[in-house]
Image (cartoon, helix red, strand yellow):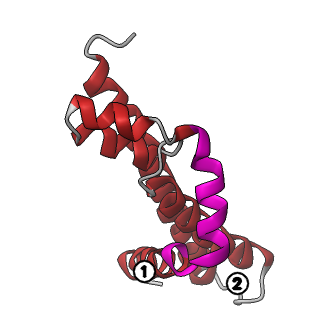
Amino acid sequence: HFNNIRRDLLILAISGPASLFLLAIFWAYVVRFSVGYGLTDQAWLVQTGIAGIYLSSIFCIIGLLPIPPLDGGKILEHFLPPAAGDAFRTIEPYGFFIIIGLFIFVPAIIVVPSEFLFRLVVSMVGI
């Protein structure tokens, strides 16, 4: 139950990217312990762990894009004044097309931050 709707919707919006960040850290530890126990870089578990870090990083960044149907849009909307938030929300029906357009025409918006997040998680865990 949402007692304070604005605050609780913000917490809900932050929980998606935060859980993906924690999932990336989990996969990094899977890789670290797998290699520590003697598995090679070509082992299935190591490869799956690396893919898990990449995918979690990519989905975390996509979720943080400030486009209304995504969590980043909900986070941005929370910090806008009410009138600006209402105006911002009007582009929500077109959000899917905006996202696809970004993927096609400006993939660096996702690739560069995802690579940064991947490297950050890998260096935090010590792989």
Residue appearing at x 38%, y 41% in the figure: 88
Residue appearing at x 35%, y 31% in the figure: 86
Residue 106 among those drawn in magenta: yes
Name the front one of labels 2 and 1.
1
Q: Which mark is residue 18?
A: none
Would you place residue 48 above or below residue 68 in this image?
below
The part of the chain drawn in magenta is: 93-110
Task: Measuring from the top left, give residue 29's x and y in whole percent.
Answer: 51, 68
Q: CA distance from mark 2 to mark 1?
A: 26 Å
Q: Which mark is residue 39?
A: 2
Precedes in sequence: disc 2 or disc 1: 2
Q: Secondary structure at mark 2?
A: loop
Residue 82 among those drawn in magenta: no
Task: Measuring from the top left, give residue 83's x and y in whole percent.
Answer: 25, 30
The quarter of the picture where the N terminus appears is top left
- Residue closest to the eye, 73 or 118: 73
Task: Measuring from the top left, give residue 81's x and y in whole percent.
Answer: 19, 35
Count the marks: 2
- Residue closest to the eye, 45 or 4: 4
Say which amino acid is labelled 1.
Phe
Would you place residue 84 above or below residue 58 in this image?
above
Residue behind mark 1: 116
Say which amino acid is labelled 2.
Leu
Q: Secondary structure at mark 1?
A: helix
